[in-house]
């Protein structure tokens, strides 16, 4: 979005960057754009309101110097959005705020541990943390989130789910649709998915690091698929949550995954890549026969959009905003999140039906090229900024 707005030249940008390291926290100008650093060392869901005072003070300083027509805030997941609201209130600028929805904690935390045993949720790791504490942190931040959404001038989003959530929290919300621009590597010329070039009976998942990504719900589906396809292989982006630390300890979630994978006899089918660049992600999407999103809740996951814009057939859990991205049977397949047998059945359909796979691939590309067109999205944002500027004054 930064690049597109810069090239359009229709507004003057300044960017506030959260910096945790005090030695790197300074303001500056680059390519004619002013950058402000704010203290992000307190940008943590575990912090209480008083601990956000440093961020609020930074925002007051920035706003007083810049006097912006519009203040764009991305996300409500962390206290920086609340701290900006406090700063804007102090200066009478809260109606100039435009808050873009990402994940919405008020509606995410009930789904965080879907399908996990209570013992795993409440088990404490070596550092004294638990999944239950993570959920509690989501709930605490959700209180700040509600205050932000009920106070800002405009709320922007990109799915029927996030619009519905916003209206539940604030019936009179001024909601405006604005899509997000994908990483440039997914618009650049290069390899796209092709049935003849992909590796048959392979799956790719973008990550499995924490329960929301639903890896514990995926593993039973893999057991079914292994019985049908003895050669099946699964590649997972990011780190391996089952990997023990230097002292041989696993997190409670990692230990549960490891025991589950062993019991289901699928451990030997899993390959974790470690962190991947955008280009490396593109390679994995193109190589896979099917991309799977098994999340317990999502708004509009970039991984699904990236897979679709490259044409990789997608099988995704029907949660959150996925029904806005995917029309079932047309450009992807949707299944009930806690029904692994349905995930296995839909992957089986793609594996067995090349006509279905190629048709979904073509329609997914067409859908995402239009939905994620950078120039169109920048125009959407500019129209919202113009409206917010008028209203804010």
Image (spheres, rainbow, N blue to C red):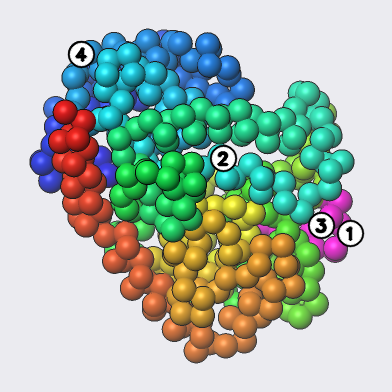
Crowd band around label 1 with a 10 angstrom C-alpha radius: few (<14), some (14–19), many (20+): few
Compared across the picture, whether 25 is left or right of 111 comes to left
The residue under label 2 is 106
Residue 155 part of the magenta segment: no
Report, in whole angstroms, how far the alpha carbon at label 3 lies from the one at label 2. 31 Å
The residue under label 1 is 263
Report, in whole angstroms, how far the alpha carbon at label 1 lies from the one at label 4. 60 Å
Q: Nearer the viewer, mark 2 or mark 1?
A: 2
Can you give x and y, in whole percent of width and height, for residue 354 in the image? Answer: 53, 87
Question: Which of disc 2 and disc 4 is earlier in sequence?
Answer: 4
Q: Regarding mark 1 in the picture, which secondary structure is present there? A: helix
Crowd band around label 4 with a 10 angstrom C-alpha radius: few (<14), some (14–19), many (20+): few
Can you give x and y, in whole percent of width and height, for residue 287 in the image? Answer: 52, 68
Report, in whole angstroms, how far the alpha carbon at label 2 lies from the one at label 1. 35 Å
- Note whether 92 is above or below 392 in the view shown: above
- Note whether 384 is above or below 80 in the view shown: below
- Stretch in magenta: 258-271
Q: Cβ–Cβ below 8 Å for labels 3 and 1?
A: yes
Magenta-colored segment: predominant secondary structure: helix
The residue under label 4 is 65
Q: Cβ–Cβ below 8 Å for labels 4 and 3?
A: no
Report, in whole angstroms, how far the alpha carbon at label 4 lies from the one at label 3. 55 Å
Q: Quadrant of the C terminus?
A: top left
Q: Cβ–Cβ below 8 Å for labels 3 and 2?
A: no
Report, in whole angstroms, how far the alpha carbon at label 4 lies from the one at label 2. 33 Å
The residue under label 3 is 261
Can you give x and y, in whole percent of width and height, for residue 173 in the image? Answer: 37, 43
Q: Cβ–Cβ below 8 Å for labels 2 and 1?
A: no
Question: Which of disc 2 and disc 3 is earlier in sequence?
Answer: 2
């Amino acid at each position: 979005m930064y690049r597109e707005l810069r090239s359009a030249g229709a507004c003057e940008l300044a960017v506030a960057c959260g910096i945790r390291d005090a030695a790197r926290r300074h303001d500056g100008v680059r390519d004619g754009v002013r950058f402000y650093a704010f203290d992000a060392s307190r940008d943590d869901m575990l912090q209480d309101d008083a601990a956000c005072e440093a961020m609020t003070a930074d925002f007051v300083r920035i706003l007083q110097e810049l006097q912006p027509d519009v203040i764009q805030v991305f996300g409500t997941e962390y206290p920086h959005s609340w701290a900006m609201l406090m700063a804007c209130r102090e200066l009478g600028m809260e109606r100039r705020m435009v808050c873009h929805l990402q994940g919405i904690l008020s509606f995410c935390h009930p789904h965080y541990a879907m399908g996990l045993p209570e013992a795993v949720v409440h088990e404490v790791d070596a550092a004294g943390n638990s999944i239950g504490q993570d959920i509690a942190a989501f709930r605490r931040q959700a209180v700040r989130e509600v205050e932000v959404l009920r106070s800002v001038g405009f709320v922007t989003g990109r799915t029927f789910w996030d619009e519905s959530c916003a209206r539940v929290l604030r019936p009179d919300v001024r909601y405006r649709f604005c899509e997000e621009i994908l990483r440039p590597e997914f618009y650049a010329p290069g390899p796209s998915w092709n049935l003849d070039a992909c590796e048959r009976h392979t799956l790719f998942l973008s990550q499995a690091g924490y329960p929301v990504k639903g890896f514990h719900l995926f593993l039973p589906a893999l057991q079914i698929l292994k019985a049908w396809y003895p050669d099946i292989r699964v590649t997972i982006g990011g780190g391996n949550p089952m990997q023990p630390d230097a002292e041989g300890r696993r997190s409670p979630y990692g230990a549960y995954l490891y025991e589950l994978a062993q019991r289901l006899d699928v451990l030997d089918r899993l390959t974790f890549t470690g962190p991947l660049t955008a280009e490396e992600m593109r390679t994995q999407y193109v190589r896979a026969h099917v991309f799977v999103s098994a999340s317990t809740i999502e708004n509009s996951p970039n991984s699904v959009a990236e897979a679709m814009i490259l044409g990789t057939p997608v099988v995704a859990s029907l949660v959150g905003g996925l029904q806005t991205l995917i029309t079932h049977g047309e450009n992807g397949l949707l299944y009930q999140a806690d029904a692994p047998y349905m995930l296995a059945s839909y992957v089986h359909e793609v594996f067995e039906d090349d006509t279905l796979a190629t048709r979904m691939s073509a329609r997914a590309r067409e859908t995402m090229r239009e939905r994620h067109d950078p120039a169109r999205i920048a125009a959407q944002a500019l129209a919202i900024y113009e409206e917010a500027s008028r209203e804010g004054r």
